[in-house]
Amino acid sequence: MLIEISEAKVQPVVSIRTTTTLELLPHVIGESYMKIMSYLQELGEQPVFAPFTAYHNLDMQNLDVEMGFPVAKLLPEKGNMKARELPASKVISSMYKGPYSGMEQPYCEMTKWLEENGYTATGVSFEYYFNSPQEVSESELLTKIVMPIR
């Protein structure tokens, strides 16, 4: 598995942050993406990169998650859709191909890489989804895992 280190630039996003359980997560992600896409169309805006889910904790019964889309500029907020900037940061990333149920392995490898290279994760990890289970088979799912580090 290839792990890359890079500098992420400041990135405006529109996102919805909520808490959910692991079981309800796919529904919450899908609903959030549809709501945000509808709002972006209303504004005449387009995402500038793949949709993401940010995991602010790993408590599977009370997941603190944020679903969103990178956009070209800060946009107005609406209801529970927030506009913010992801800060510039040093990150490690890896592209994972396969079912979501197999994502524990790349996370373990990335955590091991951090330890071996003297870095610490900030505690938030991002998953950028380049396709969806509605479009391709599970074995063809492409997810970029990004971890801000210090």
Image: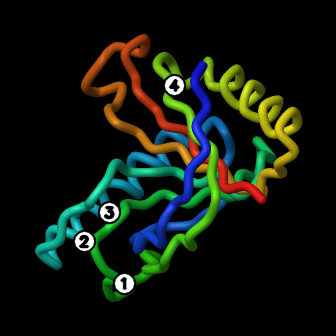
Residue at horizontal 22 percent and vertical 64 percent from the top: 38
Q: Where does the image place residue 49, in percent across and percent down from the top left?
A: 31, 53
Residue type, mark 3 in image: Lys
Picture quarter containing residue 14? bottom left
Numbered label attached to residue 67: none
Numbered label attached to residue 35: 3
Query: 87 or 30, which is in the foreground?
Result: 87
Q: Secondary structure at mark 4?
A: strand
Picture quarter containing residue 23? top right
Which quadrant, please, contains the N terminus?
Answer: top right
Please say if the residues under marks 1 and 2 sit with CB atoms less than 8 Å apart. yes
Picture quarter containing residue 69? bottom left
Residue at horizontal 58 percent and vertical 40 percent from the top: 93
Which quadrant, please, contains the C terminus?
Answer: bottom right
Q: Is residue 56 left or right of residue 132?
A: right
Residue type, mark 4 in image: Tyr
Marks 1/2: CA–CA distance: 8 Å
Residue highlighted by disc 1: 78
